[in-house]
Image: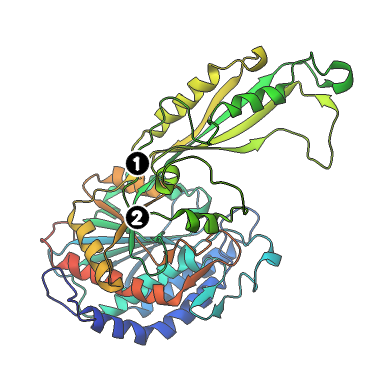
């Protein structure tokens, strides 16, 4: 491939960058496997020493990539320190901040893994292990891109790599408290990836999230179902009836005031989604419309907790009280508190079996919608298209990344871009999480090419 490496034809070609990346790749793969062997879990109950070990290894990776200005940012409420680094570019060049994280989620049941989750293994083109895709491959990609441009970095690069992202990081609110530390023309959140392997994709929207708790009280205490069932109002049945009102027969959300629109970008096919979600054969997908509309640009309501005896300890009693917790996923551009209130209003309007429900608001987090007309978006889209050899698609994510909104609120003029080394088949947070070596290589080249494209743009006062 001989495509030029920058928007104006200046700089190394994709072929030259790819050749350089191939030379670095064996060492970077080993770096990734060493990093992924560290069980850097920030949740309570896990050894915090692993977080410090991972932090130090990330510092070593950056040092080996020529980064000399590396700091240690301590944010109240976190255990693991944040790696903060700056690599200066030419005077007046744009500034780009690269973000990802080195903490991971627990491995879950080891019996579901083909190999021990914290003993990363190479399986053909894949590396299998907890955290290899989410998000340690992105750390390696950042290191690799810096190595490709070691002596000719065209922009000032700031780097933030934290160790608490997976478990409600206090860092999510920090950018608004110290915006000067994160001032940049563009911020790349490298915590996502392609819709599928081989298809360059940028994530341009994230759904918001809100929680709502509903409770019903009908009796002062539970009563024997044989003596009282049929006339004594069952609080658990009342909740079930209320929850059943949230969807129509096809499974679409019918709560008034929740925003839903068609999705026009890249998406999964129905068959792809069935495989990824592991839908049982013969069971239809929930809802109507395209997959993108259902999981990205429309609402979703899930029951995430429900009071009931476990099936191995059933109780013959009419429930006098019951509580459920609902998770609401919100259109990227709808205010999460507004959507939460719409759900609350609907539930409060109900009187299942004449019982008044108690409905309380939980946490909310707004979604995110990227601007698609900025210099950063164009630079990234062109770079990924050149590397993968096909147009870059735009997808969304049903998950939330609160930091995206925090960066945007800290400086509304900064472009927030989401792309990275993983893909929709990586099974992040699940057993046998994997990342493809070929996707890591392309991500390294794509990130380097993006930085070149940004350097070819207008001068900046941010650096």
The answer to whether residue 67 of the structure is visible from this angle is no
Q: Do labels 1 and 2 touch, CB within 8 Å?
A: no
Which residue is at a point 70% across and 24% down the rendered structure image?
237
Q: Quadrant of the C terminus?
A: bottom left
Q: Is residue 123 above or below residue 367?
A: below
Q: Position of residue 281 (x, y in %)?
A: 62, 54
Q: Is residue 372 above or below residue 316?
A: below
Pointer 1 local density, CA inside 10 Å: few below 14, some 14–19, many at least 20: some
Q: Quadrant of the N terminus?
A: bottom left
Q: Is residue 462 above or below residue 148?
A: above
Q: Is residue 323 left or right of residue 127?
A: right
Q: Which mark is residue 448?
A: none
Q: Which element carries disc 1, helix, strand or loop?
A: loop
Which residue is at a point 16% across and 77% down the rendered structure image?
11
Q: Residue furthest right?
A: 227
Q: Which mark is residue 262?
A: 1
Q: Position of residue 270 (x, y in %)?
A: 47, 53
Q: Position of residue 81 (x, y in %)?
A: 46, 60
Pointer 2 local density, CA inside 10 Å: few below 14, some 14–19, many at least 20: some
Q: Nearer the viewer, residue 197 or 248?
A: 248
| Residue located beneath label 2 in the image | 266
Q: CA distance from mark 1 to mark 2?
A: 12 Å
Which residue is at a point 24% across and 84% down the rendered structure image?
16
Q: Which element carries disc 2, helix, strand or loop?
A: loop
Q: Position of residue 460 (x, y in %)?
A: 13, 58
Q: Is residue 428 left or right of residue 87?
A: right
Q: Is residue 429 left or right of residue 416?
A: right
Which residue is at a point 48% across and 49% down the rendered structure image?
169
């Amino acid at each position: 491939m001989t495509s030029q490496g920058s928007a104006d034809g200046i700089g190394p070609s994709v072929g030259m960058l790819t050749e350089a990346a191939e030379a670095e790749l064996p060492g970077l793969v080993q770096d990734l496997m060493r990093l992924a062997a560290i069980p850097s879990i920030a949740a309570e109950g896990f050894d915090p020493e692993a977080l410090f070990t991972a932090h130090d290894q990330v510092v070593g990776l950056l040092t080996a990539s020529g980064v000399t200005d590396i700091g240690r940012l301590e944010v109240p409420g976190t255990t693991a320190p944040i790696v903060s680094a700056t690599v200066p570019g030419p005077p007046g060049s744009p500034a780009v901040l690269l973000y990802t994280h080195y903490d991971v989620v627990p491995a879950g049941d080891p019996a579901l893994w083909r190999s021990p989750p914290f003993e990363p293994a190479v399986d053909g083109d894949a590396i299998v292990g907890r955290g290899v895709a989410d998000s340690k491959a992105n750390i390696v990609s950042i290191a690799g891109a810096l190595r490709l441009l070691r002596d000719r970095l065209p922009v000032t690069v700031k780097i933030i790599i934290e160790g608490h992202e997976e478990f409600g990081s206090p860092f999510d609110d920090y950018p608004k408290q110290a915006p000067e530390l994160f001032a940049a023309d563009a911020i790349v959140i490298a915590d996502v990836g392609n819709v599928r392997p081989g298809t360059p994709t940028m994530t341009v929207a994230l759904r918001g999230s809100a929680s709502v708790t509903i409770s019903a009280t009908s009796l002062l205490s539970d009563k024997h179902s044989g003596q009282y069932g049929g006339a004594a109002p069952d609080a658990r049945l009342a909740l079930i009836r209320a929850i059943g009102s949230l969807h129509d027969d096809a499974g679409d959300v019918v709560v008034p005031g929740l925003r839903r629109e068609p999705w026009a970008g890249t998406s999964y096919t129905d068959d792809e989604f069935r495989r990824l979600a592991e839908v049982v054969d013969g069971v239809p997908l929930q809802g109507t419309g395209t997959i993108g509309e259902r999981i990205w640009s429309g609402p979703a309501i899930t029951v995430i907790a429900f009071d009931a005896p476990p099936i191995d300890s059933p109780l013959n009693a009419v429930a006098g009280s019951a509580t459920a917790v609902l998770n609401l996923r919100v259109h990227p551009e709808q205010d999460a508190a507004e959507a939460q209130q719409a759900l609350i209003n609907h539930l409060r309007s109900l009187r299942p079996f004449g019982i008044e429900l108690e409905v309380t608001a939980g946490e909310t987090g707004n979604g995110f919608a990227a601007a698609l007309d900025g210099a950063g978006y164009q630079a990234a889209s062109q770079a990924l298209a050149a590397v993968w050899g096909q147009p870059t698609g735009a997808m969304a994510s049903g998950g939330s990344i609160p930091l995206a909104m925090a960066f945007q609120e800290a400086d509304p003029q900064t472009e927030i871009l989401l792309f990275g080394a993983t893909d929709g088949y990586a099974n992040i947070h699940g057993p046998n999480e994997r990342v493809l070596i070929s996707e890591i290589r392309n991500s390294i080249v794509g990130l380097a090419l993006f930085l070149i494209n940004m350097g070819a743009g207008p001068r900046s006062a941010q650096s």
